[in-house]
């Protein structure tokens, strides 16, 4: 995966976040994006699912060609930070979340180039 592809994925994740959480679109939709359809250079598909329920926020992002050691995920109270190395350079992006989360309970896995993150929302009886 090259730097342009990482930037494209980050842009698409921003778009999904805005649509699902801040733009009044339906929650719990799956999103398959084609770079060509989105005005990007190369007609490749990216799977990006960002959903929520009453207790959790779920991220599933396909990062083809990224090794586990070239990726960091840092959940924060109101955002999640994703860092991916491509072409010897770290690309970092913070994504604002629609609700506060409990960072210490976050579950992150990266298998077969698919990043899965489950973030527990703050409930009245939870501490951050």
Image (cartoon, rainbow, N blue to C red):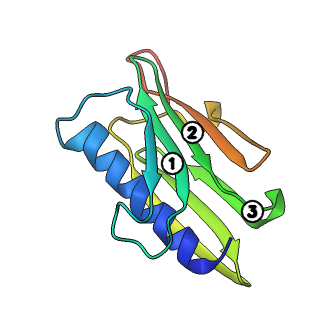
Q: Considering only order in the chain, which callout, 1 or 2, is on the residue closer to the N terminus?
A: 1
Look at discs 2 and 3 and give the one toward the viewer: 3
The image shows residue 63 at horizontal and vertical percentages of 66, 56
| Residue identified by numbered label 2 | 103
Q: Which residue is mark 3?
A: 66
First along the sequence among labels 2 and 3: 3
Q: In the image, is residue 70 above or below residue 52?
A: below
CB atoms of marks 2 and 1 within 8 Å: yes
With respect to residue 125, does 78 lie above or below? Answer: below
Q: Earlier in the sequence, mark 1 or mark 3?
A: 3
Query: Which quadrant: the N terminus?
Result: bottom right
Q: Residue furthest left?
A: 24
Looking at the image, residue 22 sits to the left or right of residue 87; the answer is: left
Q: Nearer the viewer, mark 1 or mark 3?
A: 3
Q: Is residue 56 left or right of residue 108?
A: left
Write the residue at 32% across / 38% down: 98
Q: Nearer the viewer, residue 82 or 87?
A: 87
Q: Nearer the viewer, residue 8 or 76?
A: 8
Disc 2/disc 1 C-alpha distance (Å): 6 Å
Secondary structure at numbered mark 2? helix
Alpha carbon distance from label 2 to label 3: 24 Å
Count of numbered badges drawn on the protein? 3
Label 1 vs label 3: CA separation?
Answer: 23 Å
For mark 3, give the secondary structure: loop
The image quadrant that residue 114 belongs to is top right
Above-or-below relation of 114 to 41: above
The residue at the point 43 percent across, 26 percent down is 122
- Of helix, strand and loop, which one carries label 1? loop
Is 18 on the left or on the right of 1, as rendered?
A: left
Q: Which residue is mark 1?
A: 76
In the picture, measured across the screen, residue 79 lies left or right of residue 71, that is left
**In contact (CB < 8 Å): disc 2 and disc 3:** no
């Amino acid at each position: 995966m090259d730097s342009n592809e990482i930037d494209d994925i980050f842009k698409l994740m921003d778009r999904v976040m805005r649509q699902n959480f801040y733009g009044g679109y339906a929650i719990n939709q799956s999103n398959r994006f084609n770079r060509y359809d989105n005005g990007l250079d190369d007609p490749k598909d990216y799977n990006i699912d960002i959903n929520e329920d009453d207790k959790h926020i779920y991220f599933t992002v396909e990062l083809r060609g990224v090794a586990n050691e070239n990726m960091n995920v840092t959940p924060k109270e109101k955002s999640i930070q994703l860092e991916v190395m491509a072409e010897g350079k770290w690309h970092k992006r913070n994504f604002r979340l629609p609700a506060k989360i409990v960072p210490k309970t976050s579950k992150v896995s990266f298998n077969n180039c698919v990043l899965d993150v489950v973030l527990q929302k703050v409930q009245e009886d939870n501490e951050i």
